[in-house]
Image: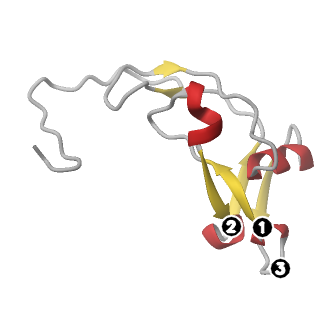
Amino acid sequence: MIASDFWGGPVRRMPVPGARSDSVEDLLHEAVPDDDSLFVFPDSSWASQVRGHRAIGVVYHPSTERTSNYVPTILGKRYDAFVHCDHTDALNPLHQFEHAQSELQTYPSAE
């Protein structure tokens, strides 16, 4: 994947370790390894249980991945359907984005 160590920082390729045990991603990897799948959730499916769900954003810290990148979720309540891709490749940006020196912060207070 591509991400940065901090918001607005330089983007680089970062490895993503295997999913945490008993997480949504771990269960899907075990169920459909080396395959891409679409899941549509009926009301009484396995997706009605609370499980850890990996959430990786623009800023990523591999050293805290196991503790800070999982959120508790009930997959069937969060999504109507879910696309699982067991393996992906990092994007190749068309160009590096650089912030202008005079760009104002807009989050959280627009100062």
Q: Residue at x 85, y 42 (%)?
A: 35
Name the residue at 66% across, 28% down.
16
Please name the amino acid that badge 2 sits on: Ile
Nearer-N-terminus badge (2/1) = 1
Determine whether the residue tagged by mark 3 lies in a helix, strand or loop: loop
Q: What element carries label 1?
A: helix
Give x and y (percent) for residue 80: 66, 71
State if disc 2 and disc 3 touch (CB < 8 Å): no
What amino acid type should be assigned to the residue bearing mark 3?
Answer: Ser
Residue 95 point in image, percent of width and height: 37, 21
Q: Can residue 15 be seen in this view?
A: yes
Identify whether 16 is placed above or below 53: above
Neighbour tally class for label 3: few under 14, some 14-19, many 20 plus, Cα within 10 Å: few
The kind of secondary structure element at disc 2 is strand
Q: Which of marks 3 and 2 is in front?
A: 2
Say the numbered circle drawn on residue 44. Answer: 3
Q: Which quadrant, please, contains the C terminus?
A: top left
Q: Tag 1: Cα neighbours inside 10 Å, few (<14), some, or many (≥20)?
A: many
Rendered location of residue 82, percent (x, y) = 70, 59
Asked if 77 appears above or below 9 in the picture, the reply is: below
Check disc 1 and report the residue beneath it.
Answer: 47
Q: Distance between the residues labelled 2 and 1?
A: 6 Å
Disc 2 vs disc 1: Cβ atoms closer than 8 Å? Answer: yes
Residue 51 image-quadrant placement: bottom right
Task: In the rendered structure, find residue 74 and report the number of the disc placed on it.
Answer: 2
Contact check, label 1 and label 3, Cβ < 8 Å: no
CA gap between label 1 and label 3 equals: 8 Å
Amino acid of disc 1: Ala
Q: Distance between the residues labelled 3 and 2?
A: 12 Å
| Image coordinates for residue 19, horizontal then vertical, percent | 75, 38
Q: Which of marks 3 and 2 is nearer the N terminus?
A: 3
Residue drawn 52% across the image and 28% down it: 61
